[in-house]
Image: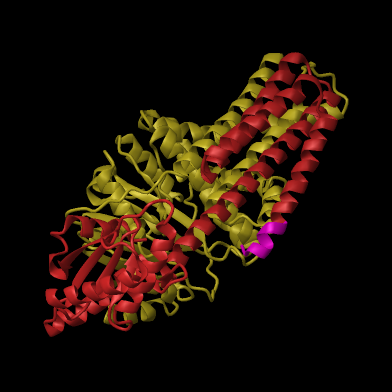
Chain colours: A yellow, B red
């Protein structure tokens, strides 16, 4: 029993040191100077925007698409997946006026979801690269060109992935916390891992891919709920890289209430559980750099949770007065270091995003005790949903994130 | 941040830093205190030399490393509850001190950068140099460009005259004074431009004239100078150059380029 305890303790210590290392690596990567790149010729790019009832946000999205600066051929395809609101009318108004904007009516089909729509979009376009934006996204003017520069100048690049920022961060405490979480995730998992392991993850939006690479990979997996994470694994297994470009920025909406947030995260986590299961029987998911992703998945979604449950049970049994093997460890100091590492990540992200303010710091300091703890509950909810779908052999329906009307538009 | 807010925030940062350092002296003791002080002093030296962003990496690395060192130290030494609380407290104080020092340096460096930018901007905006109405080099260049565009269109010619003064240490300020006055009195105030270059020579721009016209201006200048200077041989030499040929006149083009602010 003592050996198990020591093993669990070492696991948590290693995780803590690994995340500390990623934080420092992320900060170093973010502070690197930008290279001036100019290509002789710019490849053609098709921007694909899957849309289902996006009338609330579509005008702002297309305003931003018109403003995109790109020296090569750039076409924007809004892939309308059975919208019943005014999405088609808005897109058609833009398409009438701007050569670059195109309205595409996606034929009905199943399973529902982003993957099927993207596969259809790919079947009707012919560019060298394609770029996916979610329908609520407002990319900055140079978002596309920065991604193309990285994809064209990085060895073995399958494309490139940019940054996502929260447009409604000031809306309420929840959106503020989501914005901080995004900043931290991108600092560690994107910039940090890119510097340390030369590996990036597709983020579902603001991601550029070579059409040829996707064709070789076999297109999008129709059953993946986290289609971006799933595709990342297959592309990495092909020994391709995905450079992370923090200069390429898109702004997107995040859930403004808890109900929408829980549904969105449950979908993401369920998608990651699907991926975890897939990695158990796909040997290619552990080869080369894919190992970094698969190990991270296994550690985060399985070992971390199991060990945490074990240590919590241990704690409760101790409180109930059960005789347990005694093992000396500076637990208080360890808890303190967990807090230090977490807060260091949050503060670092804020410093790099230039979003440091007394209010943001206060929110950051509180997130460890509030927002971060919700992860476990969400994971539990997703695990139940996923297990039930496996037992009953049913497909979990794609749950689209609800949009909110906003007033501000990014330049 | 406006200066009126920056200075009080600097004072506040210094006050907090004194507070955390006093806390360190009160709560940390023995070897740990010395190690903390060495880390803080070394950080101050390093932060003085590095950029604000690199300083942040330094603070981050030190905070995480010392935290883990304390954790391992306590693990192998055998931790008690009170020793852990002591170590946590001193780590908080050390981290707070480092963050405050970083904020101090970043504020001061930010101010330094602001001052440099402002000085540059002032130089650009200033039209006249010193107490005379000599144009600054930037203003001189700007006006020459504007005038040249017009004269080229009209097919007129412009000339540069470069005056070099041979000075000695004792009389150099007085000679500069006299020469500046005389040259400004001699040229047509609304048409011709004068600036003083970095090496102390004077550059005169004469528009819509020819070599003969330049010579007349030079003679007039020398006549006026003779009214003020004793020497029969004036300590001034000059070069006349046509504007279109300025690229061929090495000294002059070099001065025009390098002296641009």
Location of residue A319 in the rendering, given as x and y in whole percent from the top left corner: 86, 29
Image quadrant assignment for residue B128: bottom left
Task: Identify which residue, A156 or B155, lies in the foreground.
Answer: B155
Q: Which residues are magenta?
A: B1-8
Image quadrant assignment for residue A380: top right
Query: Overall secondary structure of the magenta stretch?
Result: helix
- Residue A1 visible (yes or no): no
Point 82% across, 36% down: residue: B23
Location of residue A350 in the rendering, given as x and y in whole percent from the top left corner: 58, 51
Point 76% across, 25% down: residue: B33
Q: Is residue A35 magenta?
A: no
Location of residue A20 in the rendering, given as x and y in whole percent from the top left corner: 58, 34
Location of residue A177 in the rendering, given as x and y in whole percent from the top left corner: 63, 55
- Residue farthest to the right? A321
Instruction: Tell me: residue A152, above or below residue B232.
Output: above
Instruction: Tell me: residue B181, above or below residue A120.
Output: below
- Residue B149 visible (yes or no): yes
Instruction: Tell me: residue A253, above or below residue A214.
Output: below
The image quadrant where one finds the N terminus of chain B is bottom right
Q: Is residue B6 magenta?
A: yes
Instruction: Tell me: residue A203, above or below residue B128.
Output: above
């Amino acid at each position: 029993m003592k050996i198990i305890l020591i093993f669990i303790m070492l696991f948590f210590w290693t995780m803590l040191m690994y995340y500390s290392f990623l934080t420092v690596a992320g900060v170093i990567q973010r502070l690197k100077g930008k290279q001036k790149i100019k290509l002789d010729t710019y490849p053609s790019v098709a921007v694909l925007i899957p849309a289902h009832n996006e009338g609330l946000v579509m005008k702002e999205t297309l305003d931003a698409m018109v403003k995109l600066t790109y020296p090569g051929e750039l076409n924007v395809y809004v892939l309308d997946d059975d919208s019943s609101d005014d999405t088609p009318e808005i897109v058609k108004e833009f398409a009438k006026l701007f050569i670059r904007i195109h309205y595409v009516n996606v034929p009905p089909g199943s399973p529902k979801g982003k993957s099927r729509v993207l596969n259809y979009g790919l079947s009707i376009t012919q560019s060298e690269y394609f770029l996916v934006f979610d329908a609520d996204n407002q990319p900055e003017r140079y978002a596309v060109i920065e991604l193309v520069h990285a994809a064209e100048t990085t060895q073995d690049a399958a494309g490139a992935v940019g940054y996502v920022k929260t447009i409604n961060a000031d809306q309420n405490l929840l959106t503020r916390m989501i914005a901080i979480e995004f900043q931290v995730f991108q600092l560690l998992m994107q910039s940090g891992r890119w510097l340390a392991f030369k590996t990036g993850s597709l983020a579902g939006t603001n991601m550029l891919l070579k059409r040829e690479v996707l064709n070789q990979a076999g297109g999008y997996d129709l059953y993946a709920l986290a289609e971006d994470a799933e595709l990342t694994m297959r592309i990495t297994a092909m020994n391709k890289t995905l450079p992370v470009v923090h200069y390429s920025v898109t702004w997107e909406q995040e859930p403004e209430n808890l109900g929408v947030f829980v549904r969105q995260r449950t979908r993401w986590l369920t998608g990651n559980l699907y991926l975890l299961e897939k990695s158990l029987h796909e040997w290619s998911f552990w080869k080369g750099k894919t190992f970094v992703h698969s190990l991270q998945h296994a550690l985060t979604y399985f070992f971390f949770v199991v060990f945490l449950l074990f240590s919590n049970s241990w704690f409760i049994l101790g409180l109930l007065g059960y005789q347990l093997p005694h093992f000396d460890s500076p637990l208080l100091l360890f808890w303190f270091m967990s807090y230090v590492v977490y807060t260091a990540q949050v503060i670092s992200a804020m410093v790099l995003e230039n979003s440091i303010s007394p209010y943001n710091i206060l929110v950051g300091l509180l997130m460890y005790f509030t927002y971060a703890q919700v992860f476990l509950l969400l994971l539990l909810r997703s695990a139940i949903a996923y297990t039930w779908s496996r037992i009953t052999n049913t497909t979990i329906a794609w749950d689209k994130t609800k949009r909110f009307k906003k007033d501000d538009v990014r330049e | 941040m406006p200066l009126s807010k920056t200075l009080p925030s600097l004072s506040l940062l210094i006050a907090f830093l004194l507070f955390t350092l006093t806390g360190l002296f009160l709560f940390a003791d023995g070897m740990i205190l010395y190690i903390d002080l060495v880390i803080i002093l070394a950080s101050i030296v390093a932060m003085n030399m590095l950029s604000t962003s690199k300083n942040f990496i330094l603070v981050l690395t030190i905070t995480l490393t010392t935290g883990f060192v304390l954790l391992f130290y306590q693990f192998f030494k055998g931790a008690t509850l009170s020793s852990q609380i002591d170590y946590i407290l001193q780590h908080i104080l050390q981290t707070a001190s480092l963050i405050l020092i970083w904020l101090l340096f970043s504020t001061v460096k930010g101010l330094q950068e602001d001052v440099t930018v402002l000085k540059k901007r002032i130089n650009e905006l200033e039209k006249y140099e010193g107490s005379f109405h000599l144009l600054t080099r930037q203003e001189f260049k700007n006006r020459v460009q504007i005038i040249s565009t017009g004269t080229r269109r009209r097919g007129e010619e412009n000339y540069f005259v470069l005056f070099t003064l041979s000075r000695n240490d004792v009389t150099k300020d007085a000679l500069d004074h006299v020469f500046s006055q005389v040259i400004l009195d001699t040229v047509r105030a609304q048409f011709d431009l004068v600036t003083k270059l970095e090496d102390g020579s004077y550059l005169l721009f004469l528009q819509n004239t020819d070599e003969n016209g330049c010579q007349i201006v030079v003679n007039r200048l020398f006549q006026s100078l003779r009214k003020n200077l004793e020497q029969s041989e004036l300590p001034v030499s000059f070069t006349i150059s046509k504007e279109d040929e300025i690229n061929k006149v090495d000294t002059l083009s070099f001065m025009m380029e390098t002296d641009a602010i």
